[in-house]
Image (tube, rainbow, N blue to C red):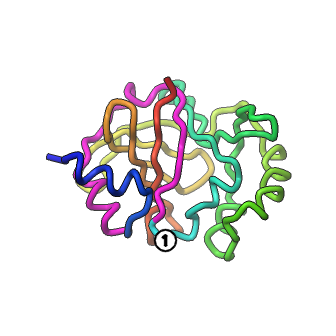
Amino acid sequence: MLTEEKIHPILQKKKATTEEALALFDQLEPVDIAFMFGRWKGSGLDTDHPMDGLLEVANWYGKEFVSPDCVHPLLFLDGNGQIFKISPNPQMMKMALSLPIPTNEAVKPVFTLFNPLLKTEKSQARLRMMEHRGKISATMIYDHLPIHDVFRKVDENTLLGLMDYKESQQPFFFILNREQ
């Protein structure tokens, strides 16, 4: 059984090795699809992955799960603090993993400039129950990217997500907090 002492050091400082994050992920309980419905605020869990910090610099807000076949995987904030949905771009994803992109406030205007070009209202993913690392849990499948985001329950309002990207050996971790 997972104890508070094991959860909070990693999730509160939002930093761990990949091995520590995987160990935590493996201890957590799976979730079903209905548990996922709603809007979730996201934040990264730094594991020295090439994407660490990129979503935050780009004004990532989180994810929204409307139904099993209607998922908005990438919600961002505009300059006025309004949430908008974007369509994931395969070329930008490859670039994020292959180029050393700085993750500081100086590059924020570049991301802010490009995000509106990717705006959409159309669903960009779906939810299915899938097995990953020995447990069947709700998994978000992107429509146009070889990515599965697998979710495990920290508590009733917190999830640990693992992004399994076919073109990356290392998983990317993130935390989702349910909007109240």
Find out whether residue 56 is within the magenta segment.
no
Find out whether residue 24 is within the magenta segment.
yes
- Residue occupied by mark 1: 48
Disc 1 on helix, strand or loop? Answer: loop
Q: Residues within 10 Å of mark 1 (few under 14, many from 20)?
A: some
Residue 55, image quadrant:
bottom right
131 relative position to 159: left or right = left
108 relative position to 30: left or right = right
Residue at horizontal 49 percent and vertical 71 percent from the top: 48
Q: Nearer the viewer, residue 72 or 28?
A: 28
Q: Position of residue 14 (x, y in %)?
A: 44, 56
Q: Position of residue 136 (x, y in %)?
A: 28, 43
| Amino acid type, residue under disc 1 in the picture | Asp
User: Is residue 136 shown above or below 106?
Assistant: above
User: Is residue 136 shown above or below 84?
Assistant: below
Residue at horizontal 37 percent and vertical 69 percent from the top: 17
Residue 10, image quadrant:
bottom left
Residue 101, image quadrant:
bottom right
Q: Position of residue 170 (x, y in %)?
A: 44, 69
23 relative position to 41: left or right = left
178 relative position to 25: left or right = right
Q: Which residues are magenta?
A: 18-46
Residue at horizontal 19 percent and vertical 47 percent from the top: 3
